[in-house]
Image (tube, rainbow, N blue to C red):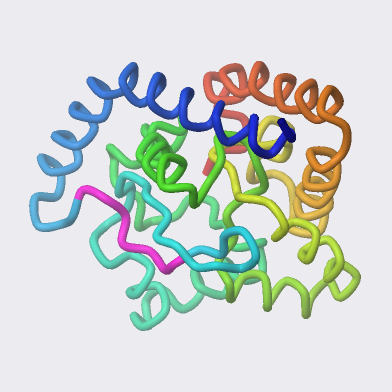
Amino acid sequence: MSYPDFKRLMDIFLSITLGAFFSPFCLITALAIKLESPEGPIFADQPLRAGKEGKLFRHLKFRSMIPNAHLLMQTDPKFKSLYEEYKSNSYKVRNDPRITKVGKFIRKYSIDEVPQFINVLKGEMSIIGPRPYFPDELEEQQRKYPYTKEYVKDTLTVRPGITGQWQVTGRSEINFDKRIELDAKYAKIISNSFIKALWYDLKILFKTPFAMLSAKGAV
């Protein structure tokens, strides 16, 4: 059995197991989101993401912002400076005024990411892998960092992950050029020998709970 085949079996097993474990937290989170802003959806209304080979998919996350947050940032004049910061800061914003009170908590401890177990079961994502990037983010950042084009190409050869090397290293504190380099390195390692790839994945998996609890680099 090849490592990608083994990894897919582990993805299915872990997503079912962890999904069942986190199901009570999902229910509480969904109720909290609707209580704070009843008019908005439970899941984030965000653009599609680029998966393996660039295939687009809906990236499931609990909504942590006001309804229509992404559209408002692009169209509402009062968010113009925020949108500029978003694009210039590796598609991340610190002290984002669109984040709700519930959203601030669930983002800090990565609870908003739990619905992605559904993406894993559907084969769109893996438990461990590169960050799922926005297509326009990849285009914009490659213009900003032209030398990252090969890194992007390598990164898109594997499924994106719920967690990965950059998440356990520094999360949002890492700029795009360093982040995509880590992602490309990961993609090459897991296409290597079975034992080396398994060991690398296990190290990331074991580091993930500590990264979540420390909330380091979360925005």
Q: Could you tell me which quadrant the N terminus lies in?
A: top right
Magenta portion: prevailing SS class: loop
* Residue 22, position as x, y percentages in the image: 33, 22
Q: Residue furthest right?
A: 147
Q: Which image quadrant is residue 115 in?
A: top left
Q: Where residue 196 appears, x then y in whole percent?
A: 86, 26
Residue at position x 38%, y 68% in the image = 70
In this rendering, the answer to whether 79 lies above or below 127 is below
Instruction: Left or right? Give the position of 4 relative to 218.
Output: right
Q: Residue 166: give x, y in percent of width and height.
A: 71, 40
Q: In the figure, is residue 177 to the left or right of 75?
A: right
Q: Is residue 39 visible?
A: yes
Q: How many labels does the image show?
A: 0
> Where in the figure is residue 139, as x and y percent of width and height?
68, 77
**Which span is picked out in magenta?**
42-48
Task: Please give the name of the residue rendered at 64% of the width and 45% of the height, measured from the top-left corner.
Answer: 172
